[in-house]
Amino acid sequence: MESIEKVRKMLERFYQGETSLEEERWLQDYLSSTTVPEDLLADRELFMAFEDKDDAIPVPRDLNVKIQNTIDREEKGSLRTRRISLYSISGLAAGLLALIAVYVFFLRNDTPLLLSARQSIDTYEDPMDAYQEAKKTLAYVSGKLSTGTSEIRHMQQVTKTTADPLKSLSKISKGSRELVLLGELQRVREIEN
């Protein structure tokens, strides 16, 4: 029972990339030579696949570099896309506010261009009517703003769900860099021999 717990802990370390080659060989020998519990059958099949070196698929020498370049390009592209969309939305909002300000202050014919502080125009005789109309107008504007921001919430959820796979891609990226270094070390050893 103790060895099964040791195997589970070592498998956990293996999947974190923290095992040495000797430990991986020990895991491979152990999983291929003994009967394992049902929850470790998938791990056994994985290590048995590592053992079958006769059916090895040739891997191009520059595959790691291509993968790394693709991952880097995707990471840069996603960051740029988010920035552009945020800048575009804020620029659009600022432009709309400017147009509304120009319309309200300069283009409406029924209001004078400049009103002094003492000069005011009342459009309602009863203040309660004015209050009700203002309340109705503000509720309308609030509803329109809520509709517009629901799209932004949806985009935030999309951004959040795409951030998690990108984090795991960066882990893969780090691992592929280490594999490139190991491949170069292997070539150096081959040259030395």
Image: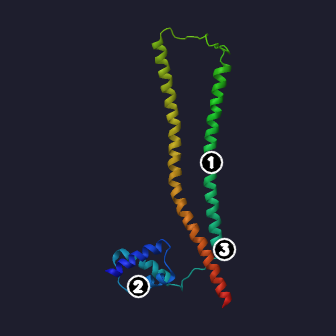
Say which of marks 1 and 3 sits in front.
1
Q: Who is closer to the viewer here, 120 or 100? A: 120
Task: Say whether disc 3 or disc 2 marks the residue closer to the N-terminus.
Answer: 2
CA distance separating discs 1 and 3: 32 Å
Q: Are marks 1 and 3 in contact (CB under 8 Å)?
A: no
Local crowd size for mark 2, using a 10 Å CA cut-off: few (<14), some (14–19), many (≥20): some
- The residue that label 1 is drawn on is 83
Q: Helix, strand or loop at disc 2? A: helix
> In the rendered view of the protein, which quadrant contains the N terminus?
bottom left
- The residue that label 2 is drawn on is 30
Q: Where is residue 139 in the image (x, y as percent from the top left)?
A: 48, 26
Local crowd size for mark 1, using a 10 Å CA cut-off: few (<14), some (14–19), many (≥20): few
Q: Helix, strand or loop at disc 1? A: helix
Task: Say whether disc 1 or disc 2 marks the residue closer to the N-terminus.
Answer: 2
98 is higher (above) or lower (below) than 176:
above
Q: Where is residue 107 in the image (x, y as percent from the top left)?
A: 68, 20
Three-letter amino acid code at disc 2? Answer: Tyr
Name which residue lies at 47% across and 84% down: 25
Task: Say whether disc 1 or disc 3 marks the residue closer to the N-terminus.
Answer: 3
CA distance separating discs 3 and 2: 34 Å
Identity of the residue furthest to the left in this view: 1
Does any portion of residue 164 appear in the rendered image? Answer: yes
Q: Where is residue 30 in the image (x, y as percent from the top left)?
A: 41, 84
Does any portion of residue 42 appear in the rendered image? Answer: no
Q: Helix, strand or loop at disc 3? A: loop
Identity of the residue furthest to the bottom in this view: 193
Q: Where is residue 78 in the image (x, y as percent from the top left)?
A: 60, 54
Three-letter amino acid code at disc 1? Answer: Arg
- The residue that label 3 is drawn on is 62
Quarter residue 66 falls in: bottom right
CA distance separating discs 1 and 2: 51 Å
Name which residue lies at 63% across and 72% down: 64
